[in-house]
Image (tube, rainbow, N blue to C red):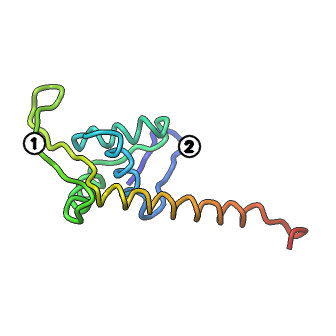
Amino acid sequence: MVAKPDDKQAELLQGTLDLLILKAVSLGPLHGYGVLLRIQQISGEELVIQQGSLYPALYRLEHQGAIASEWGDSENNRRAKYYRLTTAGRKRLEAETEKWNRMAGIIAGILRTTPESL
């Protein structure tokens, strides 16, 4: 799903691709390839989403009503499907972000635990 071309590969945890797509599209309408470039950009080049994972996720999110699409012309004058966040998608992004941040805090607390703190 995610690969980085060096030994410091960052791997996505299961279920985070949808959240990353929703965040990328929340920053403005993007075509499919633009979504993966935006994720790569905002991750500081740490995450590279494979197209084989991206397009099924885009289809799933559109089917669920979290994103909507329309055809347009890309930067190189090719037809491309552009995705935008829907109202339902914005609500889902907010809820998933809150859930992710809560879980990250819980895990960070667990990892800071020492025998002395028990």
| x 34%, y 45%: residue | 26
Vertical comparison of 72 with 16: above or below:
above
Question: Picture coordinates of residue 36 (x, y %)?
Answer: 33, 42
Depth check: give the residue in front, 42 or 90: 90
Residue at the extreme bottom of the image, as rendered: 118
Question: Picture coordinates of residue 51 (x, y %)?
Answer: 27, 48
Q: Tag 1: residue type? A: Trp
* Disc assigned to residue 103: none
SS type, badge 1:
strand
| x 22%, y 41%: residue | 31
Question: Picture coordinates of residue 4 (x, y %)?
Answer: 46, 42
| x 86%, y 74%: residue | 118
Vertical comparison of 22 with 116: above or below:
above
| Residue, disc 1 | 71
Q: Tag 2: residue type? A: Lys
SS type, badge 2:
loop
Question: Picture coordinates of residue 10 (x, y %)?
Answer: 51, 48
- Snapshot quadrant of residue 73: top left
Give the class, few, some or many, for how many residues have Cα within 10 Å of label 1's Cα (few <14, many ≥20): few
* Position of the N terminus by quadrant: bottom left
| Residue, disc 2 | 8
- Which circle's residue, 2 or 1, is located before the other in the chain? 2
102 vs 79, left or right, is: right
Give the class, few, some or many, for how many residues have Cα within 10 Å of label 2's Cα (few <14, many ≥20): few
